[in-house]
Image (cartoon, rainbow, N blue to C red):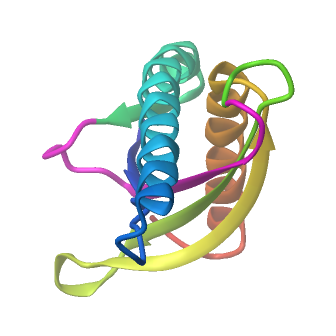
Amino acid sequence: MVRILFTFQGTTTAQSADPTEVENVLSARNLIRAWTDSVDVFLDQVALGAQDKGWMRARAGEQAHYSVMIMALPIQGGVCGPLGIMTYSIVLFEPGTGGQWKYLQNLVGYGTSAHQAAGAIFAAATQGINAARSSGHTH
């Protein structure tokens, strides 16, 4: 069974004290947080369906064979609403020396719903890991 640790990274920060900019940043941060929370739930569902194929989602603190960092940014409209699009980047890591993670690959995608994104993120992660394993990476 291959264990994958999924984590979400990235926080939008304001670059000024302008109330309009701060309000926009807080609004974007809330959208991203809601999206990542939803994707997290759907990743659990996708992982349950993938267990019979040899994939398992690791939890924080559990030993994992691979790590996937997810970063997201809304690019159009409201997230998960009509015309809302979220773009995301996933970065795959494999175990390195000294307990550190070693960069393996990055992929970019987008979706109009958290459910769609979770399925695409899990599929991209497993495909990227399989490609790395078949090219000689042993983890």
Task: Specify the quadrant that holds the N terminus.
Answer: top left
Q: Is residue 65 one of those drawn in magenta?
A: yes
Residue at horizontal 43 percent and vertical 37 percent from the top: 30
Residue 88 falls left or right of residue 94: right
Task: Specify the quadrant that holds the C terminus.
Answer: bottom left
Asked where in the image residue 128 lies, by quadrant, the reply is: bottom right
Residue found at the very far front of the displayed protein: 19
Asked where in the image residue 82 lies, by quadrant, the reply is: top right
Residue found at the very far bottom of the displayed protein: 97
In this rendered view, identify the residue nearer to me: 51 or 22.
22
Residue 35 falls left or right of residue 33: right
Q: Quick check: 20 above or below 113?
A: below
In this rendered view, identify the residue nearer to me: 136 or 27.
27
Task: From the top left corner, tell me how far across and down residue 66 is, in percent.
Answer: 42, 57
Count of numbered tags: 0
Residue at horizontal 41 percent and vertical 47 percent from the top: 26
Residue at horizontal 40 percent and vertical 50 percent from the top: 8
Task: From the top left corner, tell me how far across and down residue 83 is, in percent.
Answer: 86, 27
Task: From the top left corner, tell me how far across and down residue 78 is, in percent.
Answer: 69, 30
* Residue bounds of the magenta highlight: 59-78
Q: Quick check: 64 above or below 119?
A: below
Q: Is residue 120 one of those drawn in magenta?
A: no
Task: From the top left corner, tell me how far across and down residue 86 is, in percent.
Answer: 71, 42
Residue found at the very far left of the displayed protein: 61
Asked where in the image residue 34 lies, by quadrant, the reply is: top left
